[in-house]
Image (tube, grey):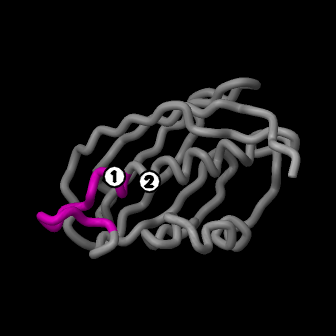
Amino acid sequence: MFRRSTSLDHLNSLSRDTAIQALGIVFTEIGDSHLQATMPVDGRTVQPYGLLHGGSSVLLAETLGSSAGNLCVDEDSMCVGLEINANHLRAVRDGTVTGTATALHVGGRTQVWEIRIEDARGRLACISRLTLAVVPRPQM
């Protein structure tokens, strides 16, 4: 499904000096039809009550969906977020969460990705859906 080849090292290098790196998100797996990353549940990603912040989960979800989407387009195009939603289903207080993005629709103008975020025990903590627009890549 992915048109462009990449490596985990390359994806992680693109995250340097971004919100992705600041939250400790690390790409961990590229499958035939999915992309996976982890994020720590610590002082960078929790809210004042010690629970994983919903915004941190959404940042992980958008990171995964957008990164996966951009692997599905040619070099002249890129994907940008149009809409994201997230349902927070289980509180997470510590450890690491793992997000997995899988495509629901990969079209020429839009893409829709489902991102499942699970706690360290494999329990679903958040389910998100991201809609991306496929647009021409700006010429630099």
Name the residue located 31 percent from the left edge and 61 percent from the top edge: 119
Residue 95 left/right relative to 130: left
Instruction: Please tell me whether residue 88 is drawn above or below residue 17 in the rendered image.
Output: above
Picture disc at residue 55: 1
Name the residue located 49 percent from the left edge and 51 percent from the top edge: 100
Q: Position of residue 48 (x, y in %)?
A: 15, 65
Say whether residue 88 is magenta: no
**Which residues make up the magenta segment?**
45-57
Q: Position of residue 133 (x, y in %)?
A: 65, 30
Residue type at mark 1 is Gly
Asked if the residue at tag 2 contacts the one at tag 1, i.e. Cβ–Cβ closer than 8 Å, the answer is yes
Picture disc at residue 59: 2
Of 29 and 50, the residue lying toward us = 50
Residue type at mark 2 is Leu
Instruction: Please tell me whether residue 26 is drawn above or below residue 87 in the rendered image.
Output: below
Residue 18 sits in quarter: bottom right
Residue furthest toward the left? 49
Residue 113 sits in quarter: top right
Instruction: Please tell me whether residue 124 is drawn above or below residue 38 in the rendered image.
Output: above
- Where disc 2 sits, the SS reads helix
Q: Residues within 10 Å of mark 1 (few under 14, many from 20)?
A: few
Residue 33 sits in quarter: top right
Name the residue located 54 percent from the left edge and 53 percent from the top edge: 63
Q: Position of residue 23 (x, y in %)?
A: 43, 69
Q: Residues within 10 Å of mark 2 (few under 14, many from 20)?
A: some
